[in-house]
Image: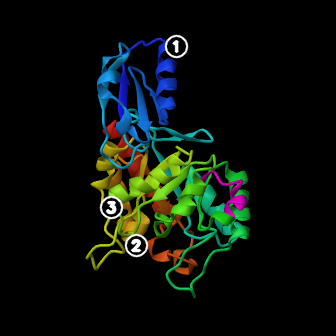
Amino acid sequence: MIVVLKPNVAMEKQERLIDWLKSLSLNVHVSTGEFQTVLGLVGDTSTVDTSLLESLEIVDTVTRVSDPFKRANRKFHPEDTVIDVNGVKIGGGNFAIIAGPCSVESEDQIVTIAKSVKASGAKMLRGGAFKPRTSPYDFQGLKKEGLRLLSIAKKETGLPVVTEVMNAADLPLFDDVDIIQVGARNTQNFDLLKELGTVGKPILLKRGIAGTLKELLMSAEYIMSSGNEKVILCERGIRTYSDYTRNTLDLAAVPMLHELSHLPVVVDPSHATGIAKLVTPMALAASVCGADGLEIEVHNNPEHAWSDGAQSLRPEDFDKLAKKVFALREVMD
């Protein structure tokens, strides 16, 4: 249920209303915007007398929300959420490129790539330390050592680090990680999502390989309902009947998610296409349709990459992509 208050309501009256709503065993989410304050009521709202609420002098409108996702819903939070990662902002008109290799392979590799993508305008460094792979025989990541190498690259460049977690038991190792990524295979690992709701770090939540938008938002709801509202949604392609690309990049999801939710939305054209030469056109398209950021795989030697070399851009190609994206955004602004 959504309760929109009238402008310039005295704080004392607002707090009395909130205390009364909490006495009805409801959780009250307060969203204070520039022009209005919205109270999002979560719980069994069937006992709430909407007529009584609407009759209060400080209440403007009362609306029941039928969507199963509440905290992620734009109706609960009309203004865009802006995620601040060590001074790097994403969402609400703030745009950021996250770039780096699929897998961390060595100190020289990750530091070299981190320096090159920063020089090209990337604001955050991605790199896999724990790697979920389809085959049990493929490289699974350097794990704890990979996290240590990411920390070195962070110190060398100042770039916030984005990396994937696979198991809640590994979370104590992620102290120096700035954004924890949830991969497509774990989007509905609800025990992991609930645990991520207890950490204070932003979560980059990827869409499941065959997940609907509602399922993605419900996964975000798991994290948010457990206390962590710093969630970034990521469209990374879904499995369809396409036989020439790795996945199908659903760019219509970007404006649709912005309509449904206040959370930032980034696009990963690398995993979506699986083909390096398709990354740039899809990154440009994502920028045009309203993405709040991009996640791009970059490797200084793709032919010998330990994972996903076929979809990784060389640093010089990433530099060209970044220039085009920034130029396009200037025109759009």
Q: Residue at horizontal 52%, vertical 85%? A: 135
Marks 3 and 2, how far apart at CA: 21 Å
State the scheme by which the image is colored: rainbow
Indicate which disc, 3 or 1, sits on the residue closer to the N terminus: 1
Residue with the mark numbered 2: 274
- Answer whether labels 3 and 2 touch (C-beta < 8 Å): no
What's drawn in magenta, residue-wise? 170-180
Amino acid type, label 2: Gly
Residue with the mark numbered 3: 212
x, y percent for residue 156:
71, 53
Amino acid type, label 3: Thr
Q: Quadrant of residue 167?
A: bottom right
Indicate which disc, 1 or 2, sits on the residue closer to the N terminus: 1
- Tell me, yes or no, whether the highlighted magenta stretch contains residue 47: no
Crowdedness near tag 1: few (<14), some (14–19) or many (≥20) residues, C-alpha within 10 Å: few
Crowdedness near tag 3: few (<14), some (14–19) or many (≥20) residues, C-alpha within 10 Å: few
Q: Secondary structure at mark 3?
A: loop
